[in-house]
């Protein structure tokens, strides 16, 4: 999960999400940006830092917290192949017996504490099933109004067991949103890992 701030015109830009190598490679020419990367997986920390270093990102900050709708701690269930680990017990391809406790960060609160509505924010979320709770919280807290562009992977029933009413509510919020350009993984050209 990454966030970036463009110092060249003092307008922050935030990027959050996974697909670390692709994202960093795509943005390696933007060294005027401050990039915050959130990755709770202990198995991926080294990879994230290595990619950031190889891209020579001069304004890069790494955070070990998991993106959530609350501040606190939670079990983080590890996927056998390192990719796809999740805070959500209903996520497929995770091992409920293989877990670590991680700190969680309330994304809406983090954005409102670090940015202002006049900043230009791009948010990329691929948070393995937690996106429904987090996106609903962004709308409920009105922090969605801080975000100019949202790139979002929505995990469907074949990847996570999610409350259908929550899923339907989030889909409705997304479809009716007029303050933020929202692109899901269903949009042509978006590639999520």
Image: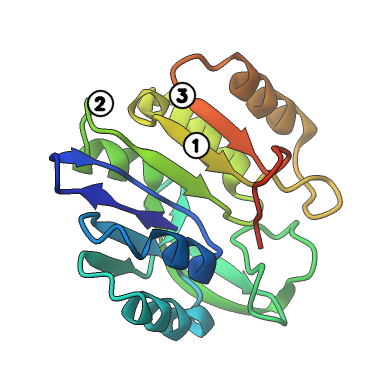
| The label number, if any, that marks residue 180 in the structure image | 3
Q: Check disc 3: other Cα within 10 Å, few if <14, some if 14-19, many if 20+.
A: some
Residue at 66% across, 54% down: 191
Badge 1 or badge 2: first in the primary sequence = 2
Q: Which residue is mark 1?
A: 150
Residue found farthest to the right = 158
Q: State whether residue 31 appears in this view.
A: yes
Residue at 21% across, 64% down: 59
Place residue 93 in its image quadrant: bottom right
Q: Which residue is mark 2?
A: 117
Q: Are marks 3 and 1 in contact (CB under 8 Å)?
A: yes
Q: Check disc 1: other Cα within 10 Å, few if <14, some if 14-19, many if 20+.
A: many
Report how far apart the C-alphas of labels 3 and 2 lie in the structure. 12 Å
Disc 2 element: loop
- Residue 169, percent from left and from top: 67, 23
25 in relation to 1, above or below: below
Report how far apart the C-alphas of labels 1 and 2 lie in the structure. 15 Å
Report how far apart the C-alphas of labels 3 and 1 lie in the structure. 7 Å
Indicate left or right for 40 with 167 as reference: left
Place residue 33 in its image quadrant: bottom left
Indicate left or right for 118 with 148 as reference: left
Residue at 40% across, 62% down: 38
- Residue 190, percent from left and from top: 64, 47
Q: Are marks 3 and 2 in contact (CB under 8 Å)?
A: no
Q: Are marks 1 and 2 in contact (CB under 8 Å)?
A: no
Disc 3 element: loop
């Amino acid at each position: 999960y990454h966030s970036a701030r463009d110092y060249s015109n003092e307008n922050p830009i935030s990027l959050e999400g996974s697909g670390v190598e692709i994202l960093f490679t795509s943005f390696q020419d933007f060294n005027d940006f401050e990039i915050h990367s959130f990755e709770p997986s202990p198995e991926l920390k080294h990879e994230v830092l290595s990619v950031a270093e190889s891209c020579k990102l001069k304004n890069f900050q790494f955070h070990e917290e998991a993106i959530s709708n609350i501040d606190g701690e939670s079990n983080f269930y590890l996927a056998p192949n390192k990719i796809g680990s999740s805070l959500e017990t209903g996520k497929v391809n995770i091992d409920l017996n293989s877990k670590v406790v991680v700190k969680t960060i309330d994304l809406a609160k983090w954005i409102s504490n670090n940015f202002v509505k006049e900043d230009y924010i791009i948010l990329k979320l691929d948070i393995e099933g937690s996106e429904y709770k987090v996106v609903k919280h962004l709308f409920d807290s009105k922090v969605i109004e801080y975000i100019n562009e949202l790139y979002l992977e929505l995990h469907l029933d074949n990847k996570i067991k999610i409350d259908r009413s929550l899923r339907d509510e989030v889909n409705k919020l997304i479809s009716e949103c007029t303050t933020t350009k929202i692109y899901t993984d269903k949009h042509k050209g978006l590639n999520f890992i």
